[in-house]
Image (cartoon, rainbow, N blue to C red):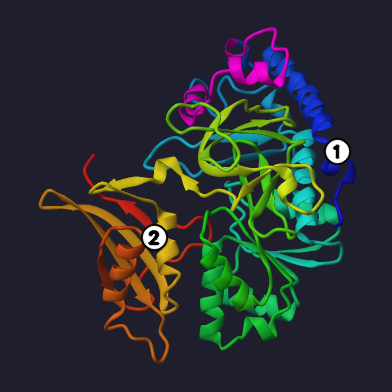
Amino acid sequence: MEYWNKKTETMPRRELRAWQWRKLSRSLDHARENSVFWGERLPDGITSLEDFTERVPLLYKSDLVAAQQTAPPYGTLPSVDPALAIRHHQTSGTSGAPPVRTFDTTRDWVWGADMWCTALYGMGARPRHKAMLAFGYGLFIGFWGMHYGLERLGCTVVPTGSMDSRSRIRLLVEQRIEFLACTPTYALRLIETAREMGVDLAKEANVRLLVAAAEPRPEKTDRVISEAFDAPVHNVAGMTELGTLNIFECPARPGANHIIETGVLEEVLHPETKEPVGYGERGVRVMTGLGREGIQIFRYWTDDLVVKRPWYECGCGRTWDWFDRGILGRTDEMRKIRGVSITPLMVEDVLRGFGEVSEFQTVLRTDRGLDVVVIRVEPRDAPGVDTASLGARISTGMKEQIGLRPEVEVVAPGSLPRFEVKAKRFHDERAG
């Protein structure tokens, strides 16, 4: 096993905890002295990691937005003069809500790129690999950090922000791209486009590693992508609020997403009681960044559902704990329909079992006072697809696996929207 930094990735847990405390202590001092927001929020005299988690209140997205709205774009949050920024990024904002805005100093950006190098090298990226990043290169931080991490690693980076899917497929084949990064949804779109073009990606392309990020997805989705490209598919996850990634999937144990514990502190708390949960128990990840100087984050309630496992259960030699299957979903995405909890990931897990489904959309609505789930499915435009029975089979599959029988509408091929960044397949149209 090779490491980007063997010392930090394999240090004994006791040394790691001491490392984290030193970095956290300096970060807390910097925040108290230089950020109006954190100066009012952080207690004095924190003496240890345990003292930190006991005394520092949880931070919610609403707190960030409120602080920024006092004096847009960054409000009272910055711990350095925003004039030192070399980058600005922000979330998309939903339902008219203000976005979370953030910036990076030169030191921040170097730290973030090093976090990316740790993940990329750990997953198998190497100098001289040709890498394609299939995303839009806009205000959303997306794969920006990955781009610079790959350059630092010595890879040749092919940005394709302005290209359509057909152009990307042609370039993928012509340039013999070895490393491809995109969302899982967009990987499926590239597979679909290649079929339309008559291109067999497994035979004609040269992809050796595919990183599918920014969306939780079931194992079935990874299998579909891996088989189409004949390449392993690995997962990473990060946050705009952190400014970089925090986990990456280990080739030594598929599904084991190591936390880069020299750069972040990750707690897992019960979604209701907010008390810590143990290894193997599902909870919400609470994140603290250890390397950023511009906009700092302490004990941020992410809404991400995770299950943490101990480091020694992965055979790679890293002493970093890991999340089983990465981010499993979000607490704010869970809906209850007639007593049954349902999430986008649960629906996708069922539908990826139907190879004839090309795209889908889930709509929650109220019909005559009752909550109803409507699933629109787009069948693959290929010979031999049995569309007549498809709706009934999907409805039965949902009932068997989730406990809820939806209405299924089979729509015309090509009629549902496609996505390049994060997919928006889940729509709650119920009043209130």
Q: Look at the image and tell me whether residue 55 can be seen.
A: yes
Q: Residue at x 58, y 58 (%)?
A: 136
Outermost left residue: 368
Amino acid tagged 2: Val
Q: Quick check: is 60 in the magenta stretch?
A: yes
Q: Eyeballing the image, is 313 above or below 81?
A: below
For the residue carrying disc 2, how many other residues have a C-alpha within 10 Å: few (<14), some (14-19), or many (20+)? some
Q: Quadrant of residue 222?
A: bottom right
Task: Say which label, 2 or 1, has the lower sequence index.
Answer: 1
Q: Position of residue 116 (x, y in %)?
A: 75, 48
Q: Residue at x 76, y 44 (%)?
A: 115
Q: Is residue 286 left or right of residue 313?
A: left
For residue 11, the mark is 1
Amino acid tagged 1: Met
Q: Residue at x 39, y 51 (%)?
A: 343
Outermost top residue: 45
